[in-house]
Amino acid sequence: MKNTASFKWYLCFILAAAIAVPSHALAAGNKTTLVIVSAAGPNSLDIQRSGTNRPSYQIAVNMYGRLVTFGITKQADGGYKYDSTTIKPELATSWETVDDGKAMIFHLRKDATFGTQAR
């Protein structure tokens, strides 16, 4: 019974706080700021490191351009889902397999830059 009462007070507090804060105050940044809220924090921003956790990948996908990406299909319920059968260009404009399929050559966009701003 005590837990139910505590939960009700907690819920009332959350609702009161949500009503008291104007909606424009909830914006954390402007159009150039990406805010990511996650239940767990990243353990690294090096996604190639062994042991990197899922929150790290969730941040990296928004920070870094990839060579290619999966296509997206619209679902019957109106939502979207990655289509792993379709590969689309991102930083690479095209790609080809060489050496009997053991290697790939990616042709990059002319405006592609790296973390050092090198082209």
Image (cartoon, helix red, strand yellow):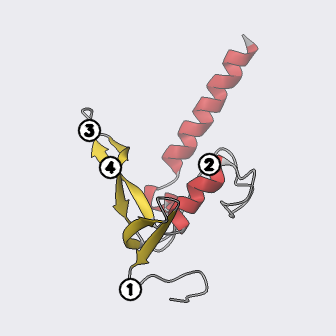
In front of the other: 50 or 53: 50
For image coordinates 39% across by 67% down, the residue present is 96
Q: Residues within 10 Å of mark 3 (few under 14, many from 20)?
A: few
Q: Are marks 2 and 1 in contact (CB under 8 Å)?
A: no
In front of the other: 42 or 92: 92
In front of the other: 95 or 43: 95
Q: Which residue is mark 2?
A: 38
Q: Report the disc number at residue 110.
A: 1
- Residue type beneath disc 1: Lys
98 is higher (above) or lower (below) than 20: below
N-terminal label among 2 and 3: 2
- Quote the CA–CA distance across marks 2 and 1: 35 Å
Frontmost of labels 2 and 3 is: 3
N-terminal label among 2 and 1: 2
Frontmost of labels 3 and 1 is: 1
- Residue type beneath disc 3: Gly
Q: Are marks 4 and 2 in contact (CB under 8 Å)?
A: no
Disc 4 secondary structure class? strand
Q: Are marks 1 and 4 in contact (CB under 8 Å)?
A: no
Disc 1 secondary structure class? loop
Q: Which residue is mark 3?
A: 78
94 is higher (above) or lower (below) than 84: below
Q: Which residue is mark 4?
A: 72
N-terminal label among 4 and 3: 4
Q: Position of residue 10 (x, y in %)?
A: 65, 31
Q: Quadrant of residue 13?
A: top right
For image coordinates 68% across by 19% down, the residue present is 5
- Quote the CA–CA distance across marks 2 and 3: 25 Å
- Residue type beneath disc 2: Ser
The quarter of the picture where the N terminus appears is top right
N-terminal label among 3 and 1: 3
N-terminal label among 1 and 4: 4
